[in-house]
Image (cartoon, rainbow, N blue to C red):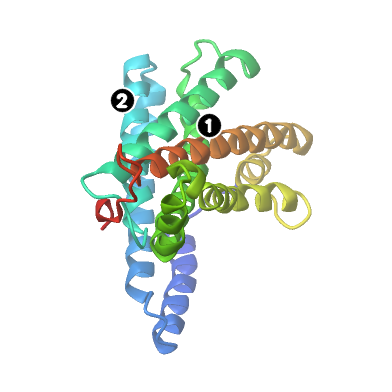
C-alpha cells in the first residue's frame, strides 16, 4: 500500500478550500459549515485512528461496547442538528438513537455471528468498521425521514386537522406523510445500491483494493456491507418515522405541533 504524507493530505485540503471559496463567492451561505466539517473530519479521524489502534491491540468486549455506545450517541445527536423542525425536549435524540440502536446493532451482531462468523464475534477489526458503516448510513436515512415527517406535518396542518374532524384516526390522517417520509429516508441507500459498480466504487471495496486485496474478494465484502446497510437503514428509518408519527399526536388524537421547535 502506498503511504500518504502530510503534504499529500494538504494538497487534498486545498481542493476543499477552493470549494469553500467558490461557495463564499456565490453567497451560498454554507462556507463556514463546510470549513468546520472539514476540520472536524481531520480531528475526528485522527482521534479514531489512535483509538482503534489501542482497541485492536487490546481486544476486549468492554472496549468495543464502549466505543459502539459513543458512536451511537454521536449519531443520535447528528440526526437532530440539521432538521428544519425537530421534536422538543430531546425526543428527536431519543427517537433517532432508539431506532438506530434496535436496527443497527441487531443487523451488525447478526452479520458478525452468522455471516462473517468472527471469533470472538466482537473482534474490533470487523465489529467497529461494520458498525460505523451501517450506523452512518442509517443516521442519514433516519435524519431525512424525521425531517420530512415534521416539516410535512407542519405544512399540511390544515389537511390533517380536517381529516381528524371528519372522524379519521390520527395514524390514518398522517399515513400518507408517514409513507412519504419513509420513502425519502430510503432514497440514499437505494441510489447507492443502484449505482454501485457502474457509477461508483463504494468505500470499503475501494479501500481493500488500494490495500492490495483481491478485487473479487473485495466485491464480496462490499455486497455484504451494502445489504447490511440497506437493512439497517430501512429498519431504522421505519422505526424512527413510526415513533415520530405517534409523538405528533396526544392521547386524545389531537395534532400537537407545539411538540416541535
Q: Furthest-bottom residue in view?
A: 25
Q: Is 209 situated left or right of 11 in this image?
A: right
Q: Which residue is the site of mark 2?
A: 66
Quadrant of residue 48 within the rendered picture: top left
Mark 1, residues whose alpha carbon is within 10 Å: few (<14), some, or many (≥20)?
Answer: many
Q: Earlier in the sequence, mark 1 or mark 2?
A: 2
Is residue 117 placed above or below 18 in the rendered structure? above
Quadrant of residue 114 within the rendered picture: top right
Q: Is 36 situated left or right of 170 in this image?
A: left
Q: Furthest-top residue in view?
A: 119
- Element type at mark 1: helix
Residue 71 visible: no
Residue at 24% across, 50% down:
88
Residue at 39% across, 84% down:
24
Residue 79: x percent and y percent? 38, 48
- Element type at mark 2: helix
Residue at 36% across, 38% down:
95
Please tell me the numbered disc located at residue 130. Answer: 1
Residue 42: x percent and y percent? 37, 55
Disc 1 versus disc 2: distance between alpha carbons?
16 Å
Amino acid at each position: 500500500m502506498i503511504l500518504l504524507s502530510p503534504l499529500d493530505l494538504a494538497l487534498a485540503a486545498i481542493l476543499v478550500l477552493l470549494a469553500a471559496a467558490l461557495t463564499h463567492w456565490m453567497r451560498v451561505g454554507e462556507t463556514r459549515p463546510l470549513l468546520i466539517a472539514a476540520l472536524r473530519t481531520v480531528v475526528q479521524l485522527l482521534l479514531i485512528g489512535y483509538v482503534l489502534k489501542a482497541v485492536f491491540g487490546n481486544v476486549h468486549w468492554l472496549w468495543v461496547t464502549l466505543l459502539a455506545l459513543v458512536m451511537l450517541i454521536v449519531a443520535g445527536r447528528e440526526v437532530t442538528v440539521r432538521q428544519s423542525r425537530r421534536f422538543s425536549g430531546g425526543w428527536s435524540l431519543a427517537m433517532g438513537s432508539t431506532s438506530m440502536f434496535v436496527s443497527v446493532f441487531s443487523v451488525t451482531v447478526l452479520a458478525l455471528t452468522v455471516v462473517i462468523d468472527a471469533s470472538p464475534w466482537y473482534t474490533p477489526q470487523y465489529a467497529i468498521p461494520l458498525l460505523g458503516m451501517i450506523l452512518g448510513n442509517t443516521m442519514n436515512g433516519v435524519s431525512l425521514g424525521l425531517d420530512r415527517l415534521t416539516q410535512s406535518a407542519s405544512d399540511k396542518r390544515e389537511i390533517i386537522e380536517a381529516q381528524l374532524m371528519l372522524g379519521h384516526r390520527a395514524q390514518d390522517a398522517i399515513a400518507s406523510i408517514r409513507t412519504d417520509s419513509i420513502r425519502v429516508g430510503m432514497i440514499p441507500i437505494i441510489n447507492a445500491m443502484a449505482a454501485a459498480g457502474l457509477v461508483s466504487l463504494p468505500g470499503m471495496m475501494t479501500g481493500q483494493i488500494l490495500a492490495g486485496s483481491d478485487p473479487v474478494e473485495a466485491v464480496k465484502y462490499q455486497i455484504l456491507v451494502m445489504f447490511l446497510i440497506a437493512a439497517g437503514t430501512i429498519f431504522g428509518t421505519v422505526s424512527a418515522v413510526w415513533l415520530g408519527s405517534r409523538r405528533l399526536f396526544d392521547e386524545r388524537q389531537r395534532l400537537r405541533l407545539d411538540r416541535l421547535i
